[in-house]
Image: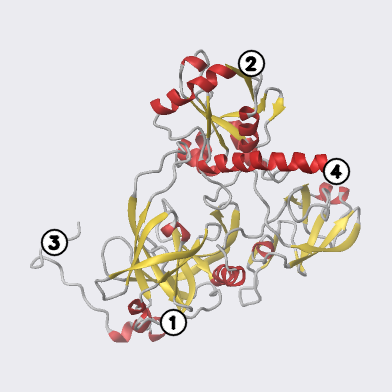
Amino acid sequence: MEGDMDDDTAPEIPSVPASRVNPSEVLNPRLLGSVVKLFVTKAEPNYSMPWQVKPQRQSTSSAFVVSGRRLVTNAHCVFCETSVRARKRGSSKKFTARVITINQQSDLAMLTVEDDKFWEGLEALEFDQVPELQETVVVAGYPAGGDNISVTKGVVSRVDLRDYGHGSFLLTIQIDAAINPGNSGGPAFKNDKVVGVARAHLKNAQNIGYIIPLPVIKHFIAMFDTYGEPAQGLCGIGFRYQYAENDWLRAKLKMQSQHTGVLITQVSTTGPENGVLHVGDVILEVDAEKIADDGTIPFRGSTWSEERISFLHQFNHKDRGELIRLQILRDGLELPIEYKAGMVPPLVPSMHGYDCWPSYFVVGGLVFLPLTTRFLKDYFGSDWRRRCPEDLLHILSRGFRSYEEEECVVLCHLLVADVNFGYKFYSTAVIKSFNDQTVLSLANLVRLVTECSAEYMEFKLEDGSQIVLSTEAARKSEAEILEQHNIPSAMSKDVSLGLQAHTNAAPRQAGAAGAV
């Protein structure tokens, strides 16, 4: 372990002769001063017990200076932070830093430091384009194993699209330089310019690291500079597709020998493609890039012209409102179409603080909450995809909402009490209806229960099971059940505010209807 080796017995580490060092691969030491170490304290929400917060934990990571007195790092490094401190290279002072924007989809965040002294002697790093295969990159940061800055070197081994989480497949550079815990958020250099942000390493593999390239970084910074708001919500696709490689499929679609592309199998009613693309269309080109039958397009014009990546790349880097131009095949006829890029709300959201919150509602000891991937991870653990029930995975695979406010509501806990005695524990059961009214969302369920004047409350589950409670008994037992389980309120603050807004709006709507 570090510090266990006696100085007298430590083996001498030979230096590398200057003649063996390639000057073009040596990073300018001046640039290392722009790489800082972050000390982060986090308190993440607990989506399986949404009235609680997980215990605080501390971590370190890396960041680097960009224009406008800002620091860039990974979103996962500062997610749910309660305190962030930044320390410059060669300094012992930790300065208070503040997160100014975060994007979980691209795993990027920007911070700033208010203290002018922090910025003394720091210079903004410059960016460069995506490096070619086999080009050398140098990764700088503060990984585990020491306190000082660390520099590792490797080559670009692959450029491809990779899952960043939250439904986003974005451009990624794979390198063979070591990226360890603490390296995240540090810059990757080529010829003294930043070509990426260190993000992750492949588990159960050696020397396979991933960095976020310039197109993703540039889009992230531009979104914040343009909209002046948290840079969340990347544009996506509101359709599902399959490859058109089979000859019989191609024949049925009336595809000629010159035609290649992907077949549209589903179109979201809440996405920008609604009313523009139809099921059965074949997308042949996107922004004048011809799509192959395996869904790929040429990546870049270079000596590595054989590189191909998924056509989704053309959609992912679009700004909101930017035109997407397609060439499609519909009933054997080629048609040019265009529409404005936009965000597609997922049926099962995943981004805390943007499209999901730790919401809950308790009635008669039954705990309801909306289905989110954050809940699945907290409830079933890191191996949640293997452990969660098939019906929830099926809902997850649906992908799109049928209407804007649609939510899947689940019963996640049964707080046993006299009022609900005799019912088994319906773990993560999906709620279908309440008193024969379809449950549209958690807010809708709360309104139905709150306004219920019937003798019984009847909850029907997706599998046909029923839970029936006495309305009077459920309401009388509420305070005792909440106190027994140390739950502060029968519903989360966001749900309570939504119910209050709905209640206040009802008289105004009734008055307007009467005036008409």
In the rendered structure, are the residues bearing label 3 and label 1 in contact, judged by CB atoms less than 8 Å apart?
no
Image disc number at residue 455: 2
Q: Amino acid at mark 1?
A: Asp
Residue 137 shows in this picture: no
Query: Residue 88: where, in percent of width, then height?
Result: 32, 74
Q: Amino acid at mark 2?
A: Glu
The residue furthest top is 422
Please tell me which of labels 1 and 2 falls first in the chain.
Answer: 1
Q: Nearer the viewer, mark 1 or mark 4?
A: 4
CA distance for labels 3 and 1: 35 Å
What's the amino acid at mark 4?
Val
Amino acid tagged 3: Met
Q: Secondary structure at mark 4?
A: loop
Picture disc at residue 516: 4
Q: How is the image coloured?
A: secondary structure
What is the CA distance from the residue labelled 3 to the residue labelled 2?
75 Å
Lower sequence index among marks 4 and 2? 2
Mark 3 in CB contact with mark 2 (< 8 angstroms): no
Q: Nearer the viewer, residue 506 or 266?
A: 506
Q: Residue at x 60, y 40 (%)?
A: 500
Q: Which residue is mark 1?
A: 192
Q: Position of residue 303 (x, y in %)?
A: 61, 77
